[in-house]
Amino acid sequence: MSEAAPLRLGVNIDHVATIRNARGGEHPDPVKAALMAVAAGADGITAHLREDRRHIRDEDLVRLKAQLSRPLNLEMAATREMVGIALKTHPHAACIVPERRQELTTEGGLDAARHHNVLAPVVAELKAASIRVSLFITCDPRQIEAAASLGAPVIEIHTGAWCEAVADRRPAIASVEFQRIKDGAARARSLGLEVHAGHGLDYRTAETISGLAEIVELNIGHFLVGEALFGGLTETVKTMRAAMDRGRARLAVPS
């Protein structure tokens, strides 16, 4: 069996900033958390600059870009303001996500098919600046094909429905949702897309999804920040990295 592609871990630091902003001031510092995550084994850092700046701030991006030794992935809405910030900051990657002011977190995938004409110039402009573009979508074949037609080189699969079914102990639904992820990842790879995944992943689900050879990057945030309250961020990132490595290692075992 051929060796599987390496699996990267992107750590999302948004909710370190959420805690900071709850009281104001500068503590805890999301940039410090990013540097700790990298030292513990993260392959990259993800930060979502929202329209209302509810967690990550503009100055956080500037500091992250200046201090990180690993790639910075900017999650952003497809607005002129965010495109301008991305072009100025020049992160390694930009993941375009849907954004609604009232939501607590990104609750669903981007409708790339419906908003094709809005997304096309954004994708083209970011690519022209040598920023790797990804689209955060569900495993709907229509959305995957729209992402490919837009010329985005990467998709990030929204894993929320599957993770929720696992957490709620609904195995039948979880099985259906995981099959959708599996089929979607295979379809995306057949179209030449690089496949990432994220939303709601914990140690158990990250280990499971790491067994899909088509997926080359997981982006995980809320769970890691929450677990860090009990075991520290360094150990939490190391434990997640180990779970992913266990899942990936199964690909090398002949069936």
Image (cartoon, grey):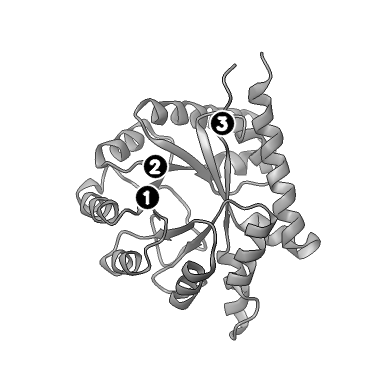
List the residue tagged with mark 2.
154
Residue 86 visible at all: yes
Where the C terminus falls, by quadrant? top right
| Kind of residue sitting beneath label 3 | Phe
Task: Identify the mark nearer the N-term, 3 or 2.
Answer: 2
Q: Nearer the viewer, residue 58 or 169?
A: 58
Q: Which mark, residue 132?
A: 1
Task: Name the residue at the bottom extreme.
Answer: 25
The span from disc 3 to disc 2 (Cα, nearest Å) is 20 Å
Which circle, 1 or 2, is nearer the viewer? 1
SS for callout 2: strand
Picture residue at 41% right of the left edge, 67% below the top: 101
Q: Residue 115: x and y, percent? A: 25, 49
| Kind of residue sitting beneath label 2 | Val
Which circle, 1 or 3, is nearer the viewer? 1
Task: Identify the mark nearer the N-term, 1 or 3.
Answer: 1
- Say which quarter of the image contains residue 189: top left
Height in image: 58 above or below 226? Answer: below
Height in image: 28 above or below 44? Answer: below
Residue 168 visible at all: no
Q: Which mark, residue 178?
A: 3
The span from disc 1 to disc 2 (Cα, nearest Å) is 8 Å
Where the N terminus falls, by quadrant? top right
Height in image: 81 above or below 2? Answer: below
Picture residue at 29% right of the left edge, 70% below the top: 81
Circles 1 and 2: CB atoms closer than 8 Å: yes
Task: Identify the mark nearer the N-term, 1 or 2.
Answer: 1
SS for callout 1: strand
Which circle, 3 or 2, is nearer the viewer? 2
